[in-house]
Amino acid sequence: MPRLAHEQKLVMEINPKSRISESFRTLRTNIRFARWENPVRTLLITSAVPGEGKTTTAANLAVSYAHEGKKVLLVDADLRKPSLHLMFGQTNLYGLTNLLTNERPDQEAIRESYIPNLSLVPSGTIPPNPAEILSSSRLDSLLEEWKRQFDIVIFDSPPTLAITDGLVVATRCDGVILVVQAGKVKLEQVRKAKMNLELVKSTVLGVVLNHVRRSKTTQANLQYYETDE
């Protein structure tokens, strides 16, 4: 059965030996060493503007942790344009918004994915007031419960320059990864996004740079590295 386009974005699962998959493993290692004494248990993946690859990054990083044997919960906190449920072939009838409004118990919102060790909480019903719902103290209690069940909780959120939703979730997380697409976003926008995150006293662990052009020599060396046993 052919894979759907959104499933093909899970390169960590489809082609774990690829250069891109190795980059996600490197990112996982860098996150671990960034907070060695206080391991990252809750992580937010965001970007400055839409279309920079934050959702793909969140999903593949989650798969990377799952491949390592960690129990992972991937949460779609993009309550405006959710897409993680599509990537994993799940329904979005209920999820995070329904948990935050006490409409559903945790057990019904957490879905096991087809990838071992990886569970998913879709966004659920799209609400009229996402920022207010995410600001609820209910999210704090959910996080405490999830940290008892999982080794790491990864959130996908909307871009920080467009709306404040991501900043609200960032205040609850141990660290934030900012995804930047080369050639798409201006440096001033990246600086503004980083400043906004720091203003709410979140910890920016680093930046993932997407769509970087490489020289022919670098590509050849990478190809040699990937095929060398």
Image: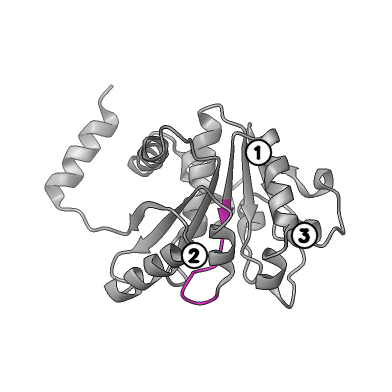
Q: Are marks 2 and 3 in contact (CB under 8 Å)?
A: no
Q: Which residue is mark 1?
A: 147
Which structural element holds mark 1?
A: helix
Q: Name the amino acid type tagged 1.
A: Lys
Q: Are marks 2 and 1 in contact (CB under 8 Å)?
A: no
Q: Position of 225 compared to 38: left or right? A: left
Which structural element holds mark 3?
A: helix
Q: Name the amino acid type tagged 3.
A: Leu
Q: Name the amino acid type tagged 2.
A: Val
Q: Residue at x 37, y 40 (%)?
A: 34
Residue 82 vertical placement versus 31 (above, below): below
Which structural element holds mark 2?
A: loop
Disc 2 to disc 1, C-alpha distance: 22 Å
| Crowdedness near tag 2: few (<14), some (14–19) or many (≥20) residues, C-alpha within 10 Å | few
Q: Residue at x 52, y 54 (%)?
A: 44
Q: Which residue is mark 3?
A: 100
Q: Quadrant of residue 229?
A: top left
| Crowdedness near tag 3: few (<14), some (14–19) or many (≥20) residues, C-alpha within 10 Å | many
Residue 141 percent location from the top left of the image: 73, 49
> Closer to the camera: disc 2 or disc 3?
2
Residue 225 percent location from the top left of the image: 23, 32
> Of the residues under marks 3 and 1, which one precedes in the sequence?
3
Q: Quadrant of residue 107?
A: top right
State the residue in front, 134 or 78: 134
Q: Which mark is residue 200?
A: 2
Q: Which residues are magenta?
A: 155-163
Q: Residue at x 69, y 72 (%)?
A: 132
Residue 146 percent location from the top left of the image: 69, 41
Residue 187 vertical placement versus 14 (above, below): below
Q: Seen from this angle, which residue lies furthest top?
A: 229
Residue 87 percent location from the top left of the image: 60, 53
